[in-house]
Amino acid sequence: MPTLNWIGKDKVINHHMDVSYRILEHSYGFDNGKQSQNEINCGNKIIHGDNLEALKALLPEYEGKIKCIYIDPPYNTGNEGWVYNDNVNDPKIKRWLGKVVGKEAEDLSRHDKWLCMMYPRLKLLHRLLAKDGAIFISIDDNEQANLRLICDEIFGGGNFLANVLWQKVYSPRMDSKGFSSSHDFILAYSKSSEFNVTKLKREQSNKQFKNFDKEKGLYYRSRSLRKEGSNSLRSDRPNLYYPLEAPDETQVFPIKPNKTEGCWRWSKDTYLKNLEEGNVEWIKKNGQWQVFVKQWKEENAERPPSTIWLSDEVGHNHSAKDEIKGFNLELSFDTPKPSTLIQEILAISTSKNSIILDSFAGSGTTAHAVINQNKIDGGNRKFILVEMEDYSENITAERVKRVIKGYCNDKKDVEGTGGSFDFYELGKPLFLDNEMLNEEVGLEKIREYVWFSETRKSYKKVNDKEEHLLGVANSSAFYFYYYKDKLTTLDDSFLRTLKTKEEQYVIYADNCVLDHSLMQKYHITFKKIPRDITRF
């Protein structure tokens, strides 16, 4: 499989493992139009902070649980005229590149910088994605080819789903190279073969299904029973070459217009079965009998999604701008995405209880789409948005608030949908620069981290009677024997306090004085705090 190399790749290929783990600090909850300091815990989250660190912070609760990821990262066009700098020269990114890539960062092209920025984020997104989930990435020609190669590397070339063309404008416009740049791409990958694309309901046109069968009371269109194409000859499929009896009892063979011998689409048995069911139509044209298959118009037709999405079906940039203006919000985005576009993605990739993540949240379109889709099908989908810019509160979150509680614009009053979310800031790191635990984050956050590092499972306190028990997994009991203001020692007296009976024990403490033979006898593994806490 082809791979892509660029300056700085060796510095970022495993950088996601070195990203500082920070906690999420709750700012406020918003519930059906009212804001409070209480954490609602409804599952909907908006997070303000660097999306690389925010993705790391989501791992203990969400690794392998996100059904659909949609991101609209910077396209790297070289345009520096809008709030989310699109030339990868944002001061935050430049500082990060200097720290991670080092002196080489001074020689990077804008494409090198973009790849260095995207690679570790995609690695963490891959970890968060469920086995039956998929990721959808909006991009244009500036980085589409590079993105395809690094996604092949991270998600696996065999998990490539589609490179969808989205018609982003409804009328032609000239770009600098003399062409009308009318489309963007949506690159789609699954986590594994467990992902299934949902077929979409598509109303069938009366222009196509214009024939009417009075007996069945249904509209239909006709398709020749003779196979078309260069490989549809008698020599290719001799078993499909046979005579059919026309209405006047003459025999008709699948002879092609150029007088060559063709073949039928169906076997003789299939033809007779469909004839009996009324799915065959004989028509005499120019003195020759021709046989057709009746394709019936379906009331609730379902079709696989196309790889071309037209603006009159899923919206365009202009409709997206109107959508944002309708909320009376400051428009800071040149190429926003319409909520109808994201709803199309949700329709083909999620179920009613899915979790959807957008780590380049922008104006909050993904949350808006999730709420709309839930309203359409009665779903209970949850959204997680991450936005690093300062407008995360007054644009991203504010838009979601107005969708929930309703709003007024110049045209009409819009009724609220109801709903709730929690707003978080990216908080303190769990480990200090000297690799010691940061006790300011609180003991429960430390316990959550340790439990996840051992089990890759979400943490829930299971037993109030055992103060230091983290939980049980795979026949092992995990204990975190730790106090903020004093050292702890794993000794005989501590062992006598254990109430959980399991095959094995993993015990964290500051020190251990147990005899090695005793530890072997009871299958005890000692881990020293903080040295033996795994970084993930």
Image: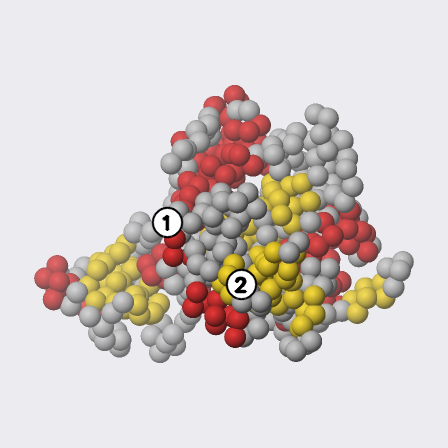
Other residues around mark 1 within 10 Å, as few (<14) / some (14–19) / many (≥20): few
Helix, strand or loop at mark 1? loop
The residues bearing labels 2 and 1 have C-alpha atoms spaced at a distance of 80 Å
Ranked by sequence position, the earlier of labels 2 and 1 is 2
Q: Is residue 178 above or below residue 523?
A: above
Q: Residue furthest left?
A: 517
* Amino acid type of the residue tagged 2 in the rendering: Thr
Task: Report the side of 372 relative to 513 (left or right).
Answer: right
Residue ID at (17%, 65%): 523
Q: Toward the viewer: 325 or 153?
A: 153
Disc 1 target residue: 535
On screen, residue 418 versus residue 507, left or right, reads right
- Name the colour scheme: secondary structure
Q: Which residue is mark 2?
A: 250
Q: Nearer the viewer, residue 116 or 354?
A: 354
Residue at (69, 45) in percent of width and height? 167
Three-letter amino acid code of the residue under disc 1? Arg
The x and y percentages for residue 237 are 40, 52
